[in-house]
Image (tube, grey):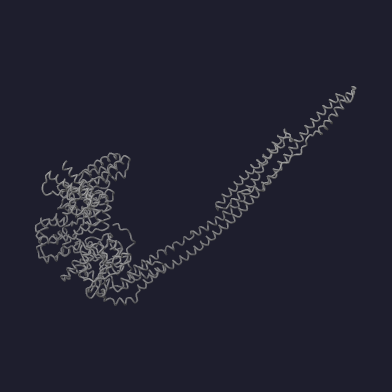
């Protein structure tokens, strides 16, 4: 399924050839080539205090963001690396490496004299499994630069407001991006603060995400809406044994009294406390989990998640991080070639439009042809439409269509729903042929309306592709 | 079901007394009057609405804010009853108005969607207070069309806080995603005596919240910002501090009160006074009692100060413009017109004198040139005549000659006249172009045509009286000539003895006769030619005289016609321009006078309104500080 990527590669090389004598354009194009080679770039954007850094930490699994407390750089890139390293890219100067190390489980970077305004971006290499296959870009400004640097966007918002939608729209303000709204996930962050911090807050947030997913205004701008509590997720991944022990003490202490102190952050961090957890530890716990996290954790420990591992697993599960990771996988990393090809196509289009020259006219036309004919993009669009619950296909067909299109994973068994057992080549072939026959019928089914038939035709095309790879 | 719940107010009585003599009411009425005087019914209506709201015995305090900041929870906590539905997935669809009643009572006010543009009649449905929250939850799930009916929910419950006339209004969240709900929030604010803006303490005030507070404080100056959820926000103290700083730097006077509804409700359940104090609600309630319930008069004054003050400012702006525009009167259009007209008249006077001179010169030149040309032509004809009659014998060739002479003269005259016409056309054209700068149609075509009826072309060439050499004359001349020869030779031959009459003398006589006849006829031809020449000359002179007289007459006549026309036109133009100038001058004079009177009126109005504004600001001793002019929030 990387036909598109190959085509865009070829286009990129040909364009480089044409603009060889234009240093600006060729520099830009060479950067795009580097980008096509590298891992998928995912930008975490959102308004101030939307929980961007917390989410980055949760995804990485360690405390890496924010880089500095105040006046930090506009963009920090986190990519997988063997040892911690930080490189500062200033405006108009050579990149400079700054000392970085893991200190007490968190990233510590000495930026020296560098201040927010002077820094274009800081690239952090960090050894973490969470960064495999992607580069996370933590942004502090709401400009479109970050979105342009990224292949996909995680947009964070606590409550979705019109301003958020406008920003989300502005980030996709490019003809190619608009036609293929496949590079954004909306994340309802800080779900623990929604409502009044009650234990059912997370369910409420998830319900809200489902509501948004059905909202026509949001559907066109992103592929999915996920509710995540970054703080809980990060806590679930980074909770240390002493902290768990303290939580256990709280959970099994005199309940009525402890609950009284769990009423407010002030009370919890106050001087008096009924059980043997010192003030420093309490502040650390409050910092780590928030009041909501404390209430939830103690409740969970009482419910039987009474080991460190069990509690962490449950916290992660409840935080929505699992869903977010699945959505990132489904929508972004598994589709990385297509998304990168899309970014490169946008960059190419910019060059061809901004620096027109006669010998490049054919290239522009060909780029358009490639994009229009790209089945991968059509697949993504249809998945997004189906995922949003838009009634293109009847319900019973919709689920299967999504699976075949690669909505649950792009490997052959995943597409055919044969993920459980190890399928044989003939079994796969059999399944593909059966699916192809079924969907060919649907594509000509007179009962279905026009849009449903054309959707079925896209599925048929996917099945044909699978058949080719099975036979291949 | 009985009548709808009517809130009972212990404070009603004192409010009635309030109505009797109120300084703010007088000022407000004066402002409304000024608005009406200045043709601003929009402002007047807004103030009238405010007036009726202020005169109501209740104190309305709407609770506004962005979604999920805990507005409903705050209201519930304030009245210690779960009236409003809370939860992140629930949004208050329509205002819930909560006032005092002796026993809990609630009514849904519904209005069927207006189908044909006219608003349907409102329906009131009683509902149990406990069911309101459920209703709202159910409604949130319902499709929007079913929600649309509900206008507001009115609730009355027995609470000490409300007994003094306080009415809390839980409003739908403000979000530009949903402008209809925002509109209903702003409607609630415009009726308010004080406004509670709710923001969660988990983060600082956002730019949009700050904009909301600004907008609200323009409609109702008494604003209190309540930071909710301080129970789950460990850093709420810092947030509150920063919020205060931000409000101050935005120029908004608003109290910031951090509260926790959860603590308050927990305190209510357990009866824990310390917890209640910790929730911040004691501060909020005491603020409401002290600043809102305790000072209805001050709230009204503040509202009037802001709204009436703003209205007066709006009235003053155009007046100031009028006043500042006055000094520029000298450059006004009418005066400019008048000055132009005057310049035009001067120019016309100069121009018309120039035209007359030009006309006279041109015409004199024309007459001289024409005459010279004609003379030249006739001279050439006469030279031809001389040459002709040196040879020809008028006796035989007169008719041919007469014909040629006629033709030559006619041609000369034609050419000459054509030239006259051409020259004249050029002259009139030149004058016409000059006149065109004043008016398009000043030179009628009739003036450019020459009346050639004056020309007398019917001259007649008279045949000269030339005598023929008749036979008898020849005989006589011959005889006379032969007589001499006969006699001469007869006498000579007689000497020879010949008779007097002999052959020789006879021959000589014949010869002499022949010679004298020949001589005679030659001299006669010469005489005839001279006569013919003289006749032709006379004729040509006659024609020249008569024609040149005619052309002179014509030229003079045309000149006179043109001169008269120019004089008349110049006079008429002068009169016209002067009339325009005078009317322009009158207009200019009037303009200045009117502007002066308008400015004077504006000045007096400004004085009046400034005085009114002074009265308005005097209502609140310290004055009410308002946020500066609206600017784009970029932060």
The quarter of the rendered structure image containing the N terminus of chain A is top left
Residue A330 in percent (x, y) is at 18, 50
Residue A270 in percent (x, y) is at 16, 64
**For the point 23% across and 76% down, which residue is it?**
B102
In the picture shown, does residue B108 fall above or below B394? below
User: Residue B403's image quarter?
Assistant: top right
Residue A124 in view here = no
**Side of B93 relative to B602 (left or right):** left
Residue A299 in percent (x, y) is at 12, 62
B26, B504: nearer the viewer: B504
User: Residue B477's image quarter?
Assistant: top right
Q: How many marks?
A: 0
In the picture shown, does residue B150 fall above or below B390? below
**Side of B190 relative to A309 (left or right):** right
Residue A72 in percent (x, y) is at 23, 53
B285, A15: nearer the viewer: A15
A426, A154: nearer the viewer: A426
Q: Looking at this view, name the residue that lies furthest to the front.
A: A446
Residue B125 in view here = yes
The quarter of the rendered structure image containing the C terminus of chain A is top left
């Amino acid at each position: 399924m990387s036909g598109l990527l190959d085509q865009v590669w070829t286009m990129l090389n040909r364009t480089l050839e044409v603009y060889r004598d234009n240093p600006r354009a060729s520099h830009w194009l060479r950067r795009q080539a580097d980008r096509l080679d590298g891992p998928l770039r995912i930008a975490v954007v959102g308004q101030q205090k939307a929980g961007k850094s917390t989410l980055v930490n949760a995804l990485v699994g360690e405390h890496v963001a924010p880089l500095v407390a105040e006046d930090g750089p506009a963009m920090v890139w986190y990519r997988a690396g063997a040892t911690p390293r930080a490189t500062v890219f200033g405006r108009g100067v050579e990149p400079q490496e700054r000392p970085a190390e893991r200190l007490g489980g968190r990233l510590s970077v000495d930026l020296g004299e560098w201040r927010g305004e002077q820094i274009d971006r800081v690239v952090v290499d960090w050894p973490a499994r969470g960064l495999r296959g992607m580069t996370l870009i933590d942004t502090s400004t709401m400009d479109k630069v970050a979105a342009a640097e990224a292949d996909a966007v995680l947009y964070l918002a606590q409550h979705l407001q019109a301003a958020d939608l406008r920003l989300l729209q502005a980030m996709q303000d490019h003809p190619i991006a608009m036609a293929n709204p496949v590079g954004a996930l909306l994340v309802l962050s800080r779900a623990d603060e929604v409502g009044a911090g009650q234990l059912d807050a997370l369910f409420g947030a998830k319900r809200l995400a489902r509501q948004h997913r059905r909202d026509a205004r949001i559907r066109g701008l992103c592929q999915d809406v996920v509710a995540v509590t970054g703080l809980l997720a990060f806590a679930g991944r980074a909770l240390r044994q002493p902290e768990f022990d303290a939580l256990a003490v709280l959970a099994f202490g005199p309940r009525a009294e402890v609950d009284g102190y769990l009423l407010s952050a002030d009370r919890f961090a106050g001087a008096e406390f009924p059980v043997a957890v010192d003030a420093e530890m309490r502040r650390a716990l409050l910092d780590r989990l928030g009041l909501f996290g404390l209430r939830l954790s103690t409740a969970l420990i009482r419910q039987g998640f009474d080991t460190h591992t069990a509690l962490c697993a449950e916290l992660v599960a409840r935080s929505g991080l699992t869903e977010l990771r699945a959505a990132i996988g489904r929508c972004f990393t598994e589709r990385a070639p297509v998304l990168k090809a899309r970014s490169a196509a946008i960059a190419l289009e910019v060059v061809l439009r901004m620096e027109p020259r006669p010998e490049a006219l054919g290239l522009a036309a060909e780029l358009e042809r490639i994009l229009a004919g790209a089945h991968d993009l059509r697949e993504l669009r249809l998945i997004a439409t189906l995922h949003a619950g838009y009634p293109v296909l009847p319900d019973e067909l919709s689920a299967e269509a999504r699976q075949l299109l690669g909505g649950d994973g792009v490997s052959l068994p995943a597409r055919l729903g044969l993920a459980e057992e190890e399928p044989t080549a003939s079994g796969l072939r059999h399944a593909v042929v059966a699916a192809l026959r079924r969907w060919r019928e649907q594509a000509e089914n007179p009962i279905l309306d026009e849009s449903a038939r054309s959707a079925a035709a896209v599925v048929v095309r996917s099945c044909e592709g699978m058949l080719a790879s099975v036979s291949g | 079901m009985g009548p709808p719940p009517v809130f009972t107010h212990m404070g009603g009585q004192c409010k009635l007394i309030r109505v009797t003599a109120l300084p703010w009411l007088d000022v407000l009425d004066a402002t409304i009057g000024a608005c009406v005087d200045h043709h601003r019914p929009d402002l007047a209506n807004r103030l009238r609405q405010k007036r009726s709201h202020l005169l109501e015995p209740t104190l309305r305090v709407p609770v506004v804010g962005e979604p999920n900041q805990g507005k409903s929870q705050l209201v519930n906590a304030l009245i210690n009853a779960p009236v409003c539905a809370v939860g992140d997935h629930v949004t208050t669809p329509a205002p819930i108005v909560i006032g005092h009643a002796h026993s809990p009572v609630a009514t849904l006010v519904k209005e069927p969607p207006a189908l044909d543009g006219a608003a349907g009649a409102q329906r009131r449905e009683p509902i149990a207070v406990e069911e309101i929250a459920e209703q709202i939850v159910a409604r949130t799930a319902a499709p929007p069309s079913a929600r649309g009916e509900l206008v507001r929910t009115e609730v009355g419950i027995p609470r000490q806080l409300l007994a003094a006339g306080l009415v809390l209004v839980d409003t739908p969240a403000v979000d530009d995603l949903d402008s209809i709900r925002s509109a209903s929030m702003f409607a609630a604010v415009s009726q308010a005596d004080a406004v509670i803006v709710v923001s969660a303490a988990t983060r600082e005030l956002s730019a949009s919240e700050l904009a909301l507070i600004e907008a609200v404080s323009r409609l109702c100056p008494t604003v209190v910002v309540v930071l909710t959820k301080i129970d789950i926000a460990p850093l709420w103290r810092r947030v509150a501090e920063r919020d205060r700083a931000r409000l101050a730097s935005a120029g908004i006077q608003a109290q910031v009160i951090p509260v926790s509804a959860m603590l308050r409700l927990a305190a209510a359940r357990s009866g824990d006074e310390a917890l209640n104090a910790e929730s911040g609600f004691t501060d909020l309630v005491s603020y409401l009692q002290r600043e809102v319930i305790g000072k209805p008069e001050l709230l009204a004054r503040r509202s009037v100060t802001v709204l009436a003050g703003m209205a007066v400012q709006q009235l003053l702006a155009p007046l100031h413009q009028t006043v500042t525009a006055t000094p520029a009167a000298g450059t006004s259009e009418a005066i400019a017109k008048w000055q132009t007209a005057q310049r035009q008249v001067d120019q016309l006077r100069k121009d018309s004198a120039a035209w007359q001179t030009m006309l006279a010169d041109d015409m004199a030149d024309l007459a001289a040139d024409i005459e010279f040309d004609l003379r030249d032509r006739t001279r050439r004809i006469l030279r031809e005549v001389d040459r002709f009659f040196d040879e020809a014998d008028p006796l035989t060739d007169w008719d041919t000659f007469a014909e040629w002479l006629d033709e030559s003269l006619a041609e000369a005259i034609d050419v000459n006249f054509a030239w006259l016409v051409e020259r004249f056309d050029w002259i009139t054209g030149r004058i016409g172009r000059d006149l065109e700068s004043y008016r398009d149609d000043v030179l009628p075509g009739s003036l450019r045509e020459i009346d050639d009826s004056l020309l007398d072309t019917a001259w007649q060439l008279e045949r000269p009286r030339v005598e023929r050499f008749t036979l008898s004359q020849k005989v006589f001349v011959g005889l006379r000539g032969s007589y001499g020869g006969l006699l001469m030779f007869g006498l000579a031959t007689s000497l020879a003895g010949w008779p007097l009459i002999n052959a020789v003398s006879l021959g000589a006589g014949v010869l002499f006769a022949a010679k004298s006849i020949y001589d005679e006829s030659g001299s006669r031809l010469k005489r005839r030619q001279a006569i013919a020449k003289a006749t032709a000359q006379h004729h040509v002179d006659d024609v020249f005289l008569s024609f040149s007289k005619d052309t002179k007459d014509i030229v003079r006549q045309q000149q006179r016609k043109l001169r008269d026309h120019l004089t008349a036109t110049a006079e008429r133009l002068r009169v016209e321009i002067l009339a325009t100038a005078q009317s322009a001058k009158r207009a200019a004079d009037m303009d200045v006078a009117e502007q002066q009177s308008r400015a004077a009126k504006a000045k007096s109005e400004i004085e009046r309104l400034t005085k009114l504004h002074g009265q308005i600001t005097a209502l609140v001793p310290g004055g009410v500080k308002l946020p500066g002019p609206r600017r784009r929030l970029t932060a």
